[in-house]
Amino acid sequence: MPGYAKSEELFKTAQEIIPGGVNSPVRAWQAVGLTPRLIVKGAGARVFDVDGNSYLDYMASWGPLILGHAAPPVVAAVQAAAARGTSFGASTPGELELAEVLCAAVPGLEMVRLVNSGTEATMSALRLARGVTGRPRVIKFDGCYHGHADSFLVAAGSGVLTHAIPGSPGVPAEIADLTMSLPYNDLDAVHRAVQRYAGEIAALIVEPVAGNMGVVPPRPGFLPGLRQICDAAGILLIFDEVITGFRVGRGGAQALYGVKPDLTCLGKIIGGGLPVGAYGGRRDLMSQMAPVGPIYQAGTLSGNPVAVAAGLATLKALEEPGVYEDLEDNGAWLARELARAAVRQGVDLTINRVGSMLTVFFTPGPVANLEDAKRCDLNRFRQFFQGMLAAGVMLPPSQFEAFFVSLAHARQDLQDTVDAAERLWARWQ
Ligand code: KE4
């Protein structure tokens, strides 16, 4: 391996003019105690850093790159769109096409609006819920992350959890007080909160498969139970499918588990690696959004034609027959073989997986909520990350994130990953 002198030099300079040297905190690799590698290229299942090192990539840009890096149809669509102009400040046919694709695929979407990030999607969905119900409170779950809008930074899972910031300075207590954060998979806690604040709760927002405390699937009955509680209390159910949308199936987690939310938030995959988010749901709710309704939300680059082209090319590629079966087969194979290697090497771990998103938790488990996830041996994860990086495998730099298998990962890539892990674990004895 040619070392990482250039990454070190550039990252040192970056820290002088960009907070922490990064444009998003988790990229600073503080949780794994290494200098982050600056990436200059991706191709298929691999990324290449500024020093010329190559890595099998399981970060997938935190989820969007389900086709792999620089997928030819996406690159071609972006090049063609850019050559026609990058933004017009006017509606374009592509925005309508993407809205039609989303509404056709996702059961809960009767209407949808494009924005620029998952944060914008969730903050807009919450404003809509509060505007329609006239109620101020919102329920979220410990370990779930919904972006960095004030109402959600009270006990978020990604970023904030990794950086041990309980909530965040700058979030007014008055705002945080309107949010309740409950244990994931705990319907009794939801019942208690709803009884305590009946009539004051606008919405309950949930990652239908949690991805920001590591992957934590919903217990059987959890999602249907949330639906029933919300129906009985007049609370709007919001599924944050920014990760799970088009990841765990074409219709997202709501199709996989058969529970339809009132509002859905999307991001990541629907932009194919470019900035696209979306929120949508029942027509009677979305019709309350300006300019047709009174609730305001806007964005200069919402529905940007180049980003929309990347999203459309990605979602079109995901219409190919068998793609989700392939992702399921490869996700299951990787999880099973990693677990078998861990047993052979006497390493205590738990692997949670849904489709092609999975997390290796360094705890005997089970891991069904944030408290369970917090029992992980973070030093073991740090050793695992560092050892795998040295072996040419780039994992997400936090115990509380998901590995993503893409359509570009060949079975041999997965085998190489398992072999690297087993060689590393053998040295742990
Ligand atoms: P963005 O604003 O980062 O596009 O989306 C926020 C968001 C909303 N909802 C869910 C379920 C999410 O996972 C996210 C963002 N995910 C994190 C990592 N899991 C993004 C990585 C980062 O913060 O750099």
Image (tube, helix red, strand yellow):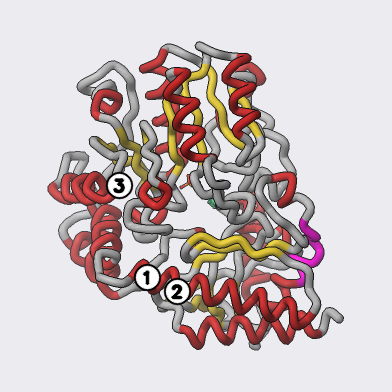
Question: What residue appears at the point 34 percent right and 27 percent down from the top-left corner?
Answer: 297
Magenta segment main secondary structure:
helix
Amino acid type, callout 2:
Asp
Q: Nearer the viewer, mark 1 or mark 3?
A: 1
Q: Nearer the viewer, residue 97 or 103?
A: 103
Any part of residue 175 in sight: no
Residue that badge 1 annotates:
325
Label 3: element kind: loop
Give the quadrant of residue 236: top left
Rendered view: 14 above or below 181: below
Q: Which residues are magenta?
A: 376-383
* Callout 2 touching callout 3 (CB < 8 Å): no
Residue 231, horizontal then vertical, whole percent: 42, 24
Q: Nearer the viewer, mark 2 or mark 3?
A: 2
- Determine crowd level at label 1: few under 14, some 14-19, many 20+ residues with C-alpha closer than 10 A: few
Q: Which mark is residue 329?
A: 2
Q: Nearer the viewer, residue 95 or 301?
A: 95
Any part of residue 38 in sight: yes
Residue that badge 3 annotates:
106
Question: What residue appears at the point 26 percent right and 56 percent down from the top-left corner?
Answer: 306
* Callout 1 touching callout 2 (CB < 8 Å): yes
Tag count: 3
Estimate the spatial distance between the alpha carbons at disc 1 and disc 3, rounded to whole Å. 18 Å
Q: Is residue 363 magenta?
A: no
Residue 13, horizontal then vertical, whole percent: 64, 61
Decide if residue 121 is on the left or right side of residue 213: left
Residue 274, horizontal then vertical, whole percent: 36, 56
Label 1: element kind: helix
Amino acid type, callout 3:
Val
From this viewpoint, which residue is outermost toward the right? 429
Q: Quadrant of the N terminus?
A: bottom right
- Determine crowd level at label 2: few under 14, some 14-19, many 20+ residues with C-alpha closer than 10 A: some
